Image: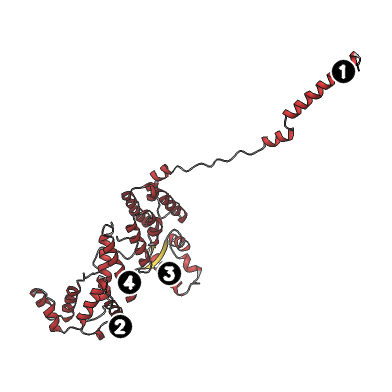
């Protein structure tokens, strides 16, 4: 069937228009979609901390901590220390550890007047007895004391009573155990973590031993094992000192709290110490058990037997002839191979922190 030329031309034009529309629609997205895409937020890019720069500035930041800074500032520095320690050599780690002590000393330093010092001591003692003491007493304190007391427990800050009955702020022994020890060698890590746990409770209080005979024996045993098992530790000399100290405290006691006078019989020995020593003497292994066996033997010796079995120099015997207690101490030290420790005269402090200073 043939259409007239005009109709044919019309139909062809209509068909081309329809096909063109389809192509345009197929290739274009709706305007709404275009607007929607243009409104998509770009991903936020957070700045990455420059760890190298942080570690290079770390010592400077630590030295900048002083008595005008906040606990938040010192906690931030401690966080930076944790990030940088894995990147450091052992010598650099120990250098940073020493610097951290100075950092806390500066942070906790307070220059009080005599009135403020007295107000501080009264406040702390009264608060121990009466926790709900008046705000007026608090306001008499140095402004830095007010701040530190409010933030006690933060940033490893605590308040302790020293052996000489002084109340002071200190960095908790757990600081080195938590911040530094995880990044040290196994033997150093064990030393710091163990000493931190032991020194959480002060060794002396009111100039008397603050731990019982069982705990003393436990510590003496630990440090004897440490010395034997970790001879290459960088803290081996301090471990030997701790071993000698706790062994001496177990078998002799302290100057203010001796466990006996002349060691003449079991009845002359402090009951708690004698019980622990007797138990140790029943064991077969370890240097401490050998010392305990010798201690029991010594206590059961007569004065004549002691002179016969324990050879002191003639000079020392003559010196101690009229001093039975001094003679007994000298004899027992030699017989048990003890190293006498005078904690008042020694310059080494192994009982306040997680390392000896």
Q: Which comes sooner in the sequence, label 2 or label 3? A: 3
Residue at the disc numbered 2: 271
* Label 3 environment density (alpha carbons within 10 Å; few <14, some 14–19, many ≥20): some
- CA–CA distance in space, label 3 to label 4: 32 Å
Mark 1 or 4: in front is 1
- CA–CA distance in space, label 3 to label 1: 106 Å
Q: Nearer the viewer, residue 178 or 295?
A: 295
Residue at the disc numbered 3: 124
Task: Please identify the quadrant where the N terminus is shown.
Answer: top right
* CB-based contact (under 8 Å), mark 1 and mark 4: no
Q: What number is the disc on residue 10?
A: 1
Residue at the disc numbered 4: 218
Determine the residue positioned at 43% across, 62% down: 145
Query: Measured along the vertical axis of the image, is residue 4 above or below residue 354?
Result: above
Mark 2 or 1: in front is 1
- CA–CA distance in space, label 2 to label 3: 35 Å
Residue 41, position as x, y percentages in the image: 63, 39
Mark 3 or 1: in front is 1
Residue 293, position as x, y percentages in the image: 23, 77
Query: Measured along the vertical axis of the image, is residue 292 above or below residue 222?
Result: below
Residue 189, position as x, y percentages in the image: 35, 58
Residue 323, position as x, y percentages in the image: 15, 80
């Amino acid at each position: 069937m043939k259409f007239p030329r005009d109709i044919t031309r019309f139909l062809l034009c209509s068909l081309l228009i329809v096909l063109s529309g389809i192509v345009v629609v197929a290739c274009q997205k709706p305007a709404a979609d275009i607007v929607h895409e243009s409104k998509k937020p770009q991903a936020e890019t957070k700045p990455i901390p420059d760890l190298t720069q942080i570690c290079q500035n770390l010592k400077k930041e630590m030295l900048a901590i002083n008595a005008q800074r906040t606990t938040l500032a010192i906690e931030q520095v401690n966080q930076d220390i944790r990030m940088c320690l894995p990147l450091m050599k052992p010598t650099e780690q120990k250098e940073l550890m020493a610097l951290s002590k100075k950092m806390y000393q500066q942070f906790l330093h307070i220059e009080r007047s005599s009135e403020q010092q007295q107000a501080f001591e009264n406040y702390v003692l009264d608060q121990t007895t009466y926790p709900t003491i008046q705000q007026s007493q608090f306001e008499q304190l140095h402004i830095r004391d007010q701040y530190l007391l409010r933030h006690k427990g933060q940033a490893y800050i605590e308040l302790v009573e020293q052996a000489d009955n002084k109340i002071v702020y200190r960095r908790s022994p757990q600081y080195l155990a938590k911040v530094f020890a995880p990044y040290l060698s196994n033997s150093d890590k064990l030393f710091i973590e163990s000493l931190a746990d032991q020194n959480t409770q002060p060794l002396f209080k009111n100039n008397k031993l603050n731990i019982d005979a069982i705990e003393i024996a436990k510590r003496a045993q630990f440090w004897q094992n440490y010395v034997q098992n970790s001879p290459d530790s960088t803290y081996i000399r301090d471990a030997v000192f701790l071993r000698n100290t706790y062994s001496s405290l177990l078998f002799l006691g302290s100057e203010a709290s001796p466990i006996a006078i002349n060691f003449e019989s079991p009845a002359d020995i402090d009951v708690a110490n004698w019980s622990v020593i007797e138990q140790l003497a029943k064991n077969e292994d370890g240097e401490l058990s050998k010392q305990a066996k010798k201690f029991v033997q010594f206590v059961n010796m007569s004065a004549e037997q002691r002179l016969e079995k324990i050879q002191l120099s003639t000079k020392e015997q003559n010196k101690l002839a009229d001093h039975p207690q001094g003679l007994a101490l000298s004899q027992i030290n030699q017989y048990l191979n003890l190293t006498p420790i005078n904690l008042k005269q020694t310059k080494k402090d192994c009982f306040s922190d997680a390392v000896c200073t």
